[in-house]
Image (cartoon, grey):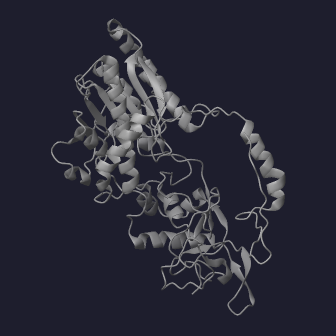
Amino acid sequence: MYIKFSLVTAKKNERWHSDGIVYPKPTWLGEELLAKLAKWSVENKKSDFKSTLSLVSIMKYSKAYQELKEKYKEMVKVWPEVTDPEKFVYEDVAIAAYLLILWEEERAERGLTARQSFVDLGCGNGLLVHILNSEGHPGRGIDVRRRKIWDMYGPQTRLEEDAITPNDKTLFPDVDWLIGNHSDELTPWIPVIAARSSYNCRFFVLPCCFFDFIGKYSRRQSKKTQYREYLDFIKEVGFTCGFHVAEDCLRIPSTKRVCLIGKSRTYPPSREASMDEKRTQYIKSRRGCPVSPPGRELCPSPLRIAAGSADHCDGHQALGARVGCVAGAWAAERGAGPQAEGAWLPGFHPREKAERVRNCAALPRGFIDQVVLQVANLLLGGKQLNTGSSRNGSLKTWNRGESLSLAEVASELDTETLRRLKRECGGLQTLLRNSHQVFRDEETEAWRDPGPCPGPTPHPEGAVLESCTMSPFSPGGGPRLLRPATPSPRCRQENTAGCEP
C-alpha cells in the first residue's frame, strides 16, 4: 500500500494560525503524524469482534434493509415517544432485516416452508415485533411497561404488558425463537429460558446493559474491555445451556452492536436431564456475583465536594448519600418483594412497571435551594481567598471556598434532610452534582456544558466577571456579561459560584 502526502502551504494573506488543535503544528505533522501513519499502514491488529454481517448474505441483507427502510420510514414522522425516532426506527429496521435473512437461510438449510415463530422478551417500543409480524412471522412481544406507540400498530401486532420472572411458568414450548433486544436484566436468562422451553427453541440476544442473573454484572478480568467480557459471559451461559453460540456484528447505529445466536445444541435430546442439572449448578454458582439490583448501583468510594466549578458528573447515577454503601437497605428491599413460585434463582426482580424519577429532580425547588445554600455557606466558611478583577478594573479578593468530603458535608445536615435525600437515587451526592454550576466534584475530571446560566448566586460576593463566559456551543458564543434575567445564554464558570449581574 502506498500513501501519497503533499504539504499545503498557506498563503501569506490567509488568516491561518497553527494552534495545535484545529490546525496542527508543522513539527507534529512531520515528526509524529507521518511515523504513526507508516506504522498503522503495516500493522495487523486483530479485532476483538467478528466482522460485520459475517453470518448472513450481505447482498440479501442490504436488499432487505432498503426495502424495510422504505416501507417503515414514516414511523419517524409519527414517533410519539421521547426517544430519538431516527435511531430507534432504523436500528429496529436493521435488526429485523438481519433476522429475516437469518431465518430465511435457516428455512433453506432445514428444508422448511413455515415461517419461524418468536417471542421478544423486553420488547420495549415493540417496533421490532411489529415489523416481524407485518413480514409474516407469527410472534408476540412482552414488556413490563406499555408504551404509547403500541396503540399505533394495530391488532395484528401482538404486544403484552407483563413482567417476566424466570421460572417454570415462563417457558415457551411452542416458539421457535426467543429474542432479547436490549433486554437488560433478562439477557443472561434468555439462553436458559430457550434451553428449557424445548429442545428446538433457539435464541437471539443483543446485549447492551451489563446484568448478571441477579443484579448488575461484576467484572472479573481487567485485560478485556467490560463489553467484551460481558459478551464472553453470555456466550458462556449459552454454551453451558447446551447451545452452539455464534457471534456476529450488526450494522446498526449503536456502539453495542454484537449479537449472540444459539441455533443448534451440543447434545442429543436424550441428555436433556443431565444438561439441565448442569444449567442449575451453573446458575447457582453465579449467586454471589451481583453487586446491585436491576436499575441501581451501589455507591463508590467517597468523593470530595468543592465550591465553584463546571466539572460535572451525571446526576442520574445511583450513588450513596453518605460515605460507605448501605448494602443492608438493598437486602431488606430484596426480601420485601414478592417472589414467583418455582423461581429458578431467588432474588431476581424484574424492573418496576412505573419508572420512578429518583434523581432529586422531583424534590421541591425550595428544599433543593435550602440544601444548596446550606452546603455553600459551609464551604465558604473556610477562607481561601482568590484575587480577581472587579468591573472598574481594580483588584479584589474573592472567597472561593474550601474543599470537604461528602461525609463532612453530610455530618452538618440534620437527620430529616438526610432521610429525605436518602429516598432519592444517590441522595446528597446526586443533589450536589446536579448543582454543578456551584459545586465541583474533585474526583471528576471531565468537563460538561453546565446548562443554562443560573440566576441568583449563593455566593455572597458574586463572581469574578472575567471567569463568566459563554459556552462555545451556544448561539453567538463569546465573552458577554450575563445577567440573571437573561436565561438563554449558557455560562461556563470556572472557580466561581455564579454570574455577576
Which quadrant of the structure image shows residue 155?
A: top left
Position above or below: 16 against 214: below
> In the rendered image, is residue 345 in sight?
no
Position above or below: 336 against 238: below
Seen from this angle, which residue lies furthest bottom? 392
**What residue do we see at 76% from left, 63% from top?**
20
Going by the image, does 445 lie left or right of 227? right
Q: Residue 258, percent across and down? A: 48, 36
Going by the image, does 357 lie left or right of 443? left
**What residue do we see at 50% from left, 55% from top?**
321
Q: Residue 287, percent across and down? A: 45, 27
Going by the image, does 334 lie left or right of 384? left
Q: Quadrant of the N terminus?
A: top right
**What residue do we see at 25% from left, 48% from top?**
146
Q: Residue 432, percent across and down? A: 53, 63
Q: Quadrant of the C terminus?
A: bottom right
Which quadrant of the structure image shows residue 10?
A: bottom right
> In the rendered image, is residue 305 in sight?
yes
Most foreground residue, 62 or 294: 62
